Image (spheres, grey):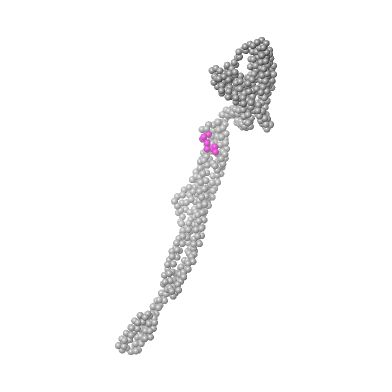
Amino acid sequence: MVGIGVGGGSLTSVGMDTSCGALLRELQHIWAEIGESEGDKDRMLSEIERECLKVYQKKVDDASRVKAQLLQSLAAKEAEVAALLASLGEHMLHLKKDSKMASLKEQLATVAPLLNDLRAKKEERIKQFSDIRSQIEKISAEITEFNHPNDAITIPIVDENDLSIRKLNQYQADFRALQKERSDRLQKVLEYVNEVHSLCGVLGLDFRKTVDEVHPSLHETGSGQSTNISNNTLEGLAQAVQKLKAERKLRIEKLRETVRSLFQLWKLMDSSDEERRRFGRLTSIIQSPEETITSSGVLSQEMIDQTEAEVERLTKLKAKRLKELVLKRRSELEEICKRAHVEPDISTAPEKTSALIDSGLVDPSELLANIEAQIVKAKEEALGRKEIMDRINKWLAASDEEKWLEEYNKDENRYSASRGTHINLKRAERARITVTKIPAMVDNLMSKTFAWEDERNMPFLYDGVRLVSILEEYKLTRQQKEEEKRRYRDQKKLQALLLTEKEAMFGSRPSPKKNNSFNRKPNGYYANGNGNGFMTPSPRRLSVGSATPELLTPRSYSGRHNGYFSKEMRRLSTMPLNFVAMPKEDSMSTFTSISGSEPESPLQV
């Protein structure tokens, strides 16, 4: 009995040993008082020992069962943790504590928070995968073909065995690529739509109807509906743009031909600005590239019909006014030729064209085209003659100054203190400088004329006369005039000598009163009187029979014959004058009529 107590004490704590030993001693004391036999005592002690063993065995079994449950739970949780770590692609190490250092409950307490965190992380990761997969499938559906809003939205299935960051990053990369493709497609669709809108505006077509044939979402996008960016839409828009461009090209070619005819008719009919203003927008179509024609409705069928109707109206009106147009263009041709001092073509003379049109032998349009060609040719010829014509005009202006200076030098009262005298004095100074340049002008003009004729292998005609002949005749006439002045000076000296001798022989006699030939109003200025001074003169023309004919210039030369006029000039310049046999008064009047200028004239050599 003592051994049991000792054995029991080895399985319990010290306190338990004390209480069990005290109870055993108390039980033995009671048994001794009762007088139990030793056999009964041993039997009862054996029963007590068996009951104790049963209690201990039950407790051990219960503890073993709890331990097994804890081990199973711990293993399950650790397995779940490992599975979650594998699916999430993480490599966290769950280090088990030593069994001597950590009980099963402590180990469970350590695994539970980690497991809860991994479960929450898995749910979040599943949500991320589901969201990005949904967006990817949505964009893919938009690219492949547009889904109607009423179609059932399928929830993408997420593979929970692979929820790693690497997989998520791959989905995100695919999503960004699809986003870029969608953005590029949307930009392309918008470009196509804008181009279709612009082309429809130019062609006057219904934009909504045009894009409706491709897809309704291109012009109206309501709630839940986005612009279609599928391959079919892009192909449809590309075909629509190509079709509209082809239509634009056809209409431009058609309208350009019509507008050219319209411009020609405007020019022929001399249409007013108000009539042209109605079709002012069409002016840019003739020379503008196709891409720059963007005005709304400028290529519409209505505009083409209006233009064709205007051309038809003007064509009918042209037949009535064609004769008037022919004569008008002929007048323009004559005016151009007159300014250029060339002879117009006699084949389209007004009287001849009128007769041909009235007889019906010639189509007026052909005559008009012929005159138009002659106008172009006359303008080109005038442009080629411009340099020489400018020099001719300078020479003519200098010749006019020379003639004015001659008239001015004849006035005996040119130095009188009258109104306007200083103006004429200044002009005379400028005129003398200009006159000294005339020979060089003529020589330079002849050189330029010869060069022009050599270059074109044709004579330079001025009002039908060769300019070189005019210049040569002018130089010859000028030389003759200089010779006349030289002879005049010599004869005047001889007359002065004769008068001196006569006065010595017969005595002096009063000179006759001189007639002031400038008391009248000569061309160009006024002498003393109501005019009170000189005015700027206009050159006058002397008759052919005058003793001192004017110098021949293109203005005075037109209509004269070279041979006849040069002979007359030479005959007049070589006519002998007998001043000795004349009375003094007659000789003085003769000198006055012969001289072109006084001895002080700047024309003296």
Q: Residue at x 57, y 30 (%)?
A: 319
Residue in front for this viewpoint, 260 or 502: 502
Residue 114 shown in magenta: no
Residue 326 to residue 573: above or below: below
Residue visible at 31% across and 86% down in the picture: 30
Percent across and percent down for residue 166 are 50, 62
Q: Nearer the viewer, residue 33 or 95?
A: 95
Which quadrant holds the N terminus? bottom left
Instruction: Name the residue at the left extreme.
Output: 33
Q: How far across and how far down the image is residue 203, in percent?
A: 52, 42
With 19 as the anchor, is 179 left or right in this view? Answer: right
Q: Give the residue drawn at x 62%, y 29%.
A: 390
Measured from the top left, where is residue 289 in percent x and y?
56, 41
Task: Decide which of 111, 492 is in the foreground and name it.
Answer: 492
Mostly what secondary structure, the magenta segment?
A: helix
Give the farthest residue toward the top. 506
Q: Percent x, y for residue 599? A: 64, 20
Total labels drawn = 0
Left or right of 334 in this view: 24:
left
**Quadrant holding the C terminus:** top right
Q: Is residue 130 above or below residue 31?
A: above
Q: Give the extent of the magenta segment.
A: 276-284
Q: Is residue 560 above or below residue 205?
A: above
